[in-house]
Image (cartoon, rainbow, N blue to C red):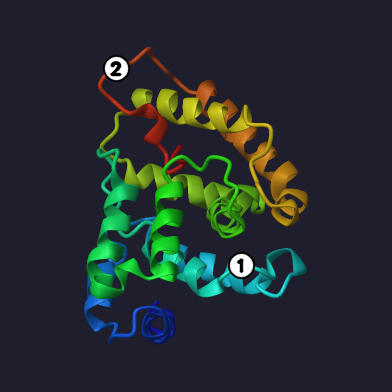
Amino acid sequence: MEATDASLRARFDALWARTVGTPGAAAWRALDAGYGAADRHYHGWPHVAALLAGHDSVRAHPDFAGVDGDAVDLAIAFHDAVYDTPRADNEARSADLLRAEAGAAAGDARVRAAIAMIHATAAHGPSADPATRLLLDLDLAVLGAPRAVYAAYAAAIRREYAAVPEAAWRLGRAQVLDRFLARPRLYQTDLFHDRLEAAARANLAAEAAGLRAGPTEQADLRNRRTHGIGGLTE
């Protein structure tokens, strides 16, 4: 992914200069320590690149005319910077990383908006903020991808949770999928809802059925934050 890395680095440096006003080398190193790690099978640089590309594809759409694109891109860059699967505070720590790297600029409106968006990815709940709704929909766009792409995503998530025993994984992941399927809408913006909602629900339902078709047991999950299993964080 070297060519992509170079392109991402150039884009990030320009974004950082516009939003924070300082050289981006230190912030990039902090991000690469996470996204470039060998255990980031899904939540790595390709995920960031996919969200940026998704944003680019809708940036000019009239529905998003009032959205601060740089704030969304800054949130995309940092939203999964910290991703430690046993922990429940990754989003808060990712937001803290942006705040720390931004330094004196952390109080600027654009950086504060990006920090708030990152926090919103913890629950992926309804938002009144147009930029946050866009970010959350971009983050969940993979759910509505063609079935083969979705299957590759699900397999990559499982690899990130390789330490979780199979029975606990099947139970916990299925519970996560069920909670998303129970929502009235997966996508908060009309554009993403119209384009992806039906396919996403079909993908989630198919994966949940497959998880339940295999061997399961009532694993003791009282000490496990099951709604964080599987990369779909609530």
Q: Position of residue 44 (x, y in %)?
A: 37, 62
Q: Amino acid at mark 1?
A: Val
Q: How many marks?
A: 2
Rendered view: 26 above or below 215: below
Rendered view: 124 above or below 76: above
How far is the residue under mark 1 from the one under mark 2?
Answer: 41 Å
Q: Residues within 10 Å of mark 1 (few under 14, many from 20)?
A: some
Q: Residues within 10 Å of mark 2 (few under 14, many from 20)?
A: few
Circle 1 sits in a helix, a strand or a loop, which is it? loop
Q: Position of residue 30 (x, y in %)?
A: 23, 69
Residue sitting at x 65%, y 46%: 187
Q: Amino acid at mark 2?
A: Arg
Rendered view: 57 above or below 188: below
Q: Is residue 186 visible?
A: yes
Q: Position of residue 35 (x, y in %)?
A: 32, 64
The mark lying in front, picked from 1 and 2, is: 1
Q: Which mark is residue 86?
A: none
Query: Along the line of sight, which residue is nearer the eye, 118 or 139?
Result: 118
Circle 2 sits in a helix, a strand or a loop, which is it? loop
Left or right position of 164 against 149: left
Residue sitting at x 57%, y 72%: 53
The N terminus appears in which quarter of the rendering? bottom left
Identify the image quadrant of residue 167.
Answer: top left
Residue on which the image places disc 1 = 67
| Chain-order first, disc 1 or disc 2 | 1
Query: Along the line of sight, which residue is nearer the eye, 215 or 80?
Result: 80
Identify the image quadrant of residue 7.
Answer: bottom left
Q: Which mark is residue 222?
A: 2
Q: Marks 2 and 1: in contact by CB < 8 Å? A: no
Left or right position of 83 against 135: left
